Image: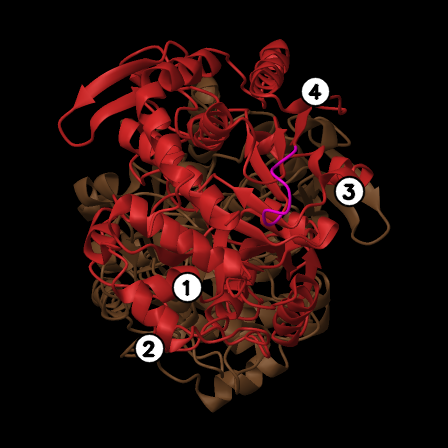
Chain colours: A brown, B red
């Protein structure tokens, strides 16, 4: 039974689509590359653009200065007593565009293009990540306000301009403005669908831990003739230690590594199995014929629900052309872990370091140089009724049951909402894996944009029922 | 009972020492750096100097052109029926001198210096490696000829000028001139004494095998969030394979790796134990407290008599500052083996490659890029009576029993004499480990030079008895 408030809003969205695309084009023309200081003024301009656009809908929005690029914060009052106060997050900054010569059209001259595989797409830097996604929510609010004269719920907007450059201002800003930013539920539109046309709500994101160590053996580089045999070889020792990180089943062998890891409930696992994820394409597209993670877990579980300990960099000795008969004094290793469940980054770091140190041979020592930042996994509180309401709403829009999906990557903002503002987050995005975010020729399917706007309208209706 | 021919020769050597040092100084002033084309004329001049000097003793010597720096070959007839035809080898080229600012005196302005630790030394590039050592033999011949009017045996001289730059002309020249260069025994003076004052005959040199491989996993570098877990990580796999090269006792675990390796005879091992080798200083000078090679073998055995498989270079993934969440497509490894006994480089290469390939996980492949050169170990034929004769002669000169010692490094020339000319080689040198060969402030102790000359006179007497 469709909410009677909804039908005119959806009609309005359909009718207004060309103008919505035009508005997005306007935002896409602003070259808000946050990592490059040369584009500081353009980042500022993108923030101004958003403030103006929100104010145009009747949102009380303003630009807020930070030591870096500005934030945009806006508040819209909703109809009386209609569900939770929502805080919508997105980012207006974009990735750099190099290699520029691989773009078929200029990255900041967005255009509509017809494609065989995806129908119409909006081509340009930021079309998908995250300007297009961000605007799906803004357009839904615009349409609702145009039809009903008011928003269906109290809605706050929070846009940052540093997501692609490490968000240095984010945590301080959230802490300083916690009272203003606190709401009942955060909404984030910066994720993909698990498969084309399959509406997806992210139920869990993996956390992250980074570390780095140098294993030091002899005092100086040695000649492999004069010292080969008696000498400790740091390359051999670091290889032995790295090999000890996993057992023969692919399980991480660091003591108590899995503390805080929970098995995926059978119901969720069954849902994942039918969520439309194309395992074969996922693997074959990168040259693999099978999953290589922990035995006994599916590819999706390995990617979404299991922790990892990966070596991301390894080096030592002579690495140039030809050979050199050297036994080097040092070997180096960079690692990252992806965390799930309640794994504690700080305790895990200690355990990994203890694992390495317990395996050092005599005459060797280790120096740690990793930064001490770490982010726990974010497990969404999908027991909240808003998640089921959103799932139903998405299912109606896409004529396909919406799925709760995991994510292998880490989106720190979700954890920050929880830790700093005590706020659960709901991540719903309409991007596709082939949108080429961070790459040349980024695009956003018009279908993603159009049905994304309609999806948010349905979700707003469902949450304010 | 001293050979009556010997005493006047030794007296002559003592008396002539200042002139012998002057002659060496003359050779040291010639900047015969073979690896730098700018010094081509000086290499030629050093060859001319040697030809002139040999001719001055009555040796039929000449310079022989090669595509690189010239060889010097000379022949001296000896007294009738007096022992083996000897071929003496040395090299007149020297290492580059950088870093020049670390030399206390100019490298090509040799001088006599008094030192606390070593008494008088001859300071300058090439003083020890190999001009000073080479001249010990020439001076012994000069003195013998001066006293007796003839050499005690038939002696040929063979000097090259490319030893410090890979000897590209050596094998072709030996093959083209095999008949002329063939003798009964080769003598080489290019090695050190195992400890100061301990006369040493090298009984074995290790051989060498080089190889390099790239382990390739995913088709492209992957993101550790999106693919961490299911993806094969080449850094982890290459570490596991490297770790499999050795067992927990330090023994190489490649199948049949030890084929052709012989245990050191108890007699030789006992001799090594009392040869004066300072194990503690050898280890502590490079920051080690104990030997790290195969359990059950002494430091000297590990260095001289046991084969090794060492990783000399290892790299892959992100090696810059900070971290990058990458799972790289490739990992790289350079290895060298030191060989002993009858280990066959070609078969060993196959075994190592098979060991690696048998341990590849699905979806991984390996690409080999090592050069295919390899040199078997050289085990001297110390059962020949000349070795015992030389050992006795050295013991008389140094008032300390001479020892047969191994060498951890590789001196390919010994193998070439055997393989190309069918010639056993006897390596006797008077250098000390602190001569700083290949380094700034190279020196040769006057004691090494003086007693080296006397040693060769005694050896010539012993071999021509």
SS at badge 1: loop
Q: Are marks 3 and 1 on the same chain?
A: no
Report which residue position mark 2 lands on. Answer: B296
Local crowd size for mark 4, using a 10 Å CA cut-off: few (<14), some (14–19), many (≥20): some
Q: CA distance from mark 2 to mark 1?
A: 78 Å
> Considering only vertical position in the picture, is A402 above or below A239?
below
**Which tag, 4 or 2, sits closer to the chain's start?**
4
Query: In the rendered image, which quarter is residue A274 located in?
Result: bottom right
Q: CA distance from mark 4 to mark 2?
A: 50 Å
- In the image, is A266 to the left or to the right of A342? right
Where is the C terminus of chain A found, in terms of image quarters?
A: bottom left
- The chain that hosts pointer 2 is B
Q: Position of residue B256 (x, y in %)?
A: 59, 78
SS at badge 2: loop
Can residue B297 be seen by looking at this rendering?
yes
- What secondary structure predominates along the stretch shown in magenta? loop
Q: Nearer the viewer, mark 3 or mark 1?
A: 3
Magenta-drawn stretch contains B127: no
Q: Are marks 1 and 4 on the same chain?
A: no
**Which tag, 3 or 4, sits closer to the chain's start?**
4
- The chain that hosts pointer 1 is A
**Image disc number at residue A464:** 1
**Which tag, 2 or 3, sits closer to the chain's start?**
3
Point out the stretch of residues depicted in magenta. B77-84
Report which residue position mark 4 lands on. Answer: B63
Q: Are marks 3 and 4 on the same chain?
A: yes
């Amino acid at each position: 039974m469709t909410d009677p408030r909804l039908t005119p809003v959806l009609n309005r969205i359909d009718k207004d689509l060309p103008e919505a695309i035009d508005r997005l084009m306007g935002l896409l023309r602003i070259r808000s590359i946050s990592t490059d200081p040369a584009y500081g003024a353009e980042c500022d301009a993108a923030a101004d653009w958003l403030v103006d656009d929100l104010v145009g809908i009747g949102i009380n929005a303003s630009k807020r200065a930070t030591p870096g690029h500005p934030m945009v914060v806006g508040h819209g009052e909703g109809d009386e007593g209609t569900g939770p106060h929502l805080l919508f997050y997105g980012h207006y900054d974009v990735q750099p565009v190099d290699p520029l010569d691989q773009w078929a059209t200029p990255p900041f001259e967005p255009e509509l293009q017809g494609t065989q595989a995806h129908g119409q797409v909006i081509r340009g830097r930021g079309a998908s990540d995250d300007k297009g996604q961000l605007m799906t929510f803004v357009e839904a609010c615009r349409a609702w306000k145009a039809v009903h004269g008011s928003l269906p719920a109290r809605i706050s907007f929070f846009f940052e301009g540093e997501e692609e450059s490490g968000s240095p201002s984010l945590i301080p800003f959230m802490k300083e403005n916690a009272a203003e930013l606190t709401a009942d539920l955060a909404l984030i539109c910066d994720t993909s669908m698990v498969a084309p046309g399959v509406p997806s709500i992210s139920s869990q994101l993996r956390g992250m831990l980074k570390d780095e160590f140098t294993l030091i053996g002899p005092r100086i580089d040695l000649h492999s003739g004069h010292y080969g045999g008696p000498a400790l070889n740091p390359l051999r020792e670091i290889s032995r230690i790295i090999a000890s990180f996993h057992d023969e089943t692919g399980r991480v062998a660091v003591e108590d590594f899995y503390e805080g890891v929970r098995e995926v409930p059978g119901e969720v696992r069954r849902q994942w199995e039918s969520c439309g994820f194309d395992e074969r394409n996922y693997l074959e597209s990168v040259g693999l014929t099978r999953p290589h993670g922990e035995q006994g877990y599916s590819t999706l579980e390995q990617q979404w629900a299991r922790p990892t300990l990966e070596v991301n960099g390894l080096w030592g000795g002579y690495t140039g052309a030809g050979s050199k008969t050297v036994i080097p004094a040092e070997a180096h290793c960079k690692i990252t872990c992806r965390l799930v469940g309640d794994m504690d980054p700080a305790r895990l770091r200690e355990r990994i370091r203890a694992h390495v140190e317990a395996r050092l041979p005599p005459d060797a020592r280790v120096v740690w140089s990793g930064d001490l930042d770490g982010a726990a996994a974010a497990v969404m509180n999908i027991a909240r009724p808003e998640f089921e309401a959103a799932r139903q709403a998405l299912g109606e829009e896409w004529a396909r049951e919406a799925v709760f999906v995991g994510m292998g990557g880490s989106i720190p903002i979700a954890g920050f909402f929880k830790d700093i503002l005590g706020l659960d987050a709901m991540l719903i995005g309409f991007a596709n894996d082939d949108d080429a975010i961070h790459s040349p020729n980024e695009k956003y399917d018009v279908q993603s944009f159009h049905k994304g706007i309609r999806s948010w309208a349905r979700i707003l209706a469902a949450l304010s029922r």
